[in-house]
Amino acid sequence: MALQLIDTGLLREQAYINGQWTSGDENTIDSIPVTNPATGEVIAHVPRLGEAETIRAVEAAEQAMTGWRRKTAKERAVLLRRWHDLMLEHQDDLAKLMTAEQGKPLPQAKGEVAYGASYLEWFAEEGKRAYGDIVPSHANDKRILVTKEPVGVVAAITPWNFPSAMIARKAAPALAAGCTIVIKPAEVTPLSALALAELADRAGIPAGVVNVVTGKASAIGGVMTSHPSVRKLSFTGSTPIGKLLIKQCADTVKKVSMELGGNAPFIVFDDADIDKAVEGAMVSKYRNSGQTCVCANRLFVQDGVYDEFIEKFVAKVRELSVGDCLVEDFDQGPLIDRAAVEKTDEHVQDAISKNGRLLCGGEQHVAGELFYTPTVIADATPDMQCYKEETFGPLAPVFRFKDEDDVIRMANDTEYGLASYFYANDLRRVFRVAEALEYGMVAVNEGILSTELAPFGGVKESGMGREGSRYGIDDYLEIKYILLGGM
Ligand SMILES: NC(=O)C1=CN([C@@H]2O[C@H](COP(=O)(O)OP(=O)(O)OC[C@H]3O[C@@H](n4cnc5c(N)ncnc54)[C@H](OP(=O)(O)O)[C@@H]3O)[C@@H](O)[C@H]2O)C=CC1
Ligand SMILES: O=C(O)CCCC(=O)O
């Protein structure tokens, strides 16, 4: 089925370098088919670019830095704001493109477009507040000034699970700070990225300030992590690739921001409002078919409310509809690829083999090869794979716990530290538990915590740096100390 867009100009099948659309060098020309994971249908092709084109993109970004950083914060804000407005104006088309290449339900895709745009709006304003300091001096004839400057050319590598918002979340603070950017989207979801580049172009963002290079991950990543003009790498994706990129950046000592994997605990205490906890677990676990780095990976429920929670939760999970979200309004679309289905099923079978009680799901869904039924497994135990590893699929393993110490120990028993959730009403417990969880983000009595207003990021092997909020621009700014003598 052909993609029906209101504005067909948003379906771009070329990379965007220095304000030009390009299929790459003639001698390296090759293309990547983009498929709809719901049907397997090829919906577009994008160029498979490599080192030469990435170097050109970095050089273009380097040249564009001069003019871009000289603009006032307000001038940059006007352009960012236009980009934001265009995203919202084309929200339906952008969502359709996203659902076609990624599979998520259309309302979630629309929500992601608005969420991505919110970073452009936020940082357009925040760029105006990149204040410096005048520090009390150590001598009467000297003055100490502290200013903030853009770090330089930024490289961004983004994942397929949020193909639009993860780009906006990096491009917005970079551009607001006065940096230029070269973006490598995930191979399977380049169309959302190219549509954003098209809108940046229409917004009047100058050539070279935003570049999108599609193609070979290792070749593009190799240039991004070694080219001396790139001063910062911002990555969202898996922990193993994040570690590799940090190592690669070491030789040229680049700044890095890393949003990596998670293993989020979702804890329900005896004193919680169980209906609210069930509601929170549904969105935290099954949003984007369980494919978010902040998804609840392990549900811990206290003895006294375990059976009640399970009963209510399973009833809701059974109601989830699954299917091709471009055709109908389903709650859950396909997983991204065969490997994702296999990993989810491996975790399910492993849990069952270790006496986990399968309460619903646990198999491929009839809707197609990449669909998996929303699954709940009770009596989960720490020897299961799903306790240690991020499933990144629609499996909710529910663990039973006795007391607070017990659950804090299990919640923190992981090398990850991104998002965590808990439901409780005792105020003292709320503070105790929030402080004891070794996570960059803690949601209390809520199942979704993402907003452009708050700092998103993890500790331990979940990464470094924060995106969004007033802290988010710091990663794109260098501090300069200026000493004025003989005053
Ligand atoms: N923290 C998060 O938000 C995410 C976590 N994950 C986790 O990672 C697992 C695997 O997902 P996957 O998509 O493979 O994640 P990856 O970490 O492999 O991919 C994320 C991005 O990194 C790129 N990339 C991969 N290898 C390199 C490289 N050598 N140099 C430079 N860039 C590279 C990818 O490009 P390309 O697509 O071209 O390979 C993509 O743009 C998931 O099952 C999930 O557990 C996945 C996505 C997001
Ligand atoms: O999964 C991710 O890669 C980011 C989570 C999206 C969000 O909630 O901000």
Image (cartoon, rainbow, N blue to C red):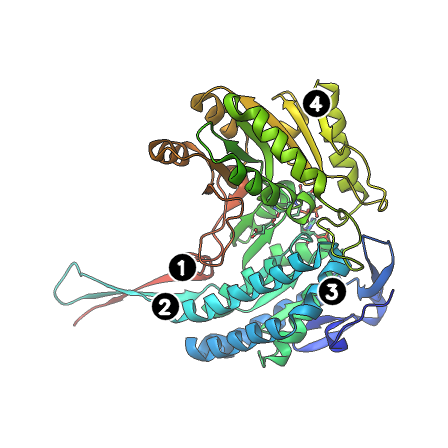
Q: CA distance from mark 3 to mark 2?
A: 35 Å
Badge 2: residue crowd in 10 Å (few <14, some 14–19, many ≥20)? few
Q: Is residue 162 above or below residue 430?
A: below
Name which quarter of the figure residue 222 lies in: bottom right
Residue 119 location, x and y as percent? Answer: 51, 64
Instruction: Give the amino acid at mark 1.
Output: Arg
- Residue placed most toward the observer, 240 or 422: 422
Q: Residues within 10 Å of mark 3 (few under 14, many from 20)?
A: many
Along the polypeptide, which appears first: circle 3 or circle 2?
Answer: 3
Nearer the N terminus, badge 1 or badge 3?
3
Image quarter of the N terminus: bottom right
Residue pictured at 46% horizontal, 71% vertical: 124
Direction from residue 209 to residue 369 in the image, left or right: right
The answer to whether the residues at label 2 and label 4 have Cβ atoms under 8 Å apart is: no
Viewer-side label of 4, 1 = 4
Cα gap from disc 2 to disc 1, whole angstroms: 9 Å
Q: CA distance from mark 1 to mark 3?
A: 31 Å
* Residue 415 in sight in this render: yes
Q: Earlier in the sequence, mark 2 or mark 1?
A: 2
Q: Is mark 3 within 8 Å of ligand 1?
A: no
Circle 1 — which element?
loop
CA gap, disc 3 and disc 4: 38 Å
Which numbered mark, 2 or 4, is in the foreground of this view?
Answer: 4
Of the image marks 4 and 1, the number of the one nearer the N terminus: 4
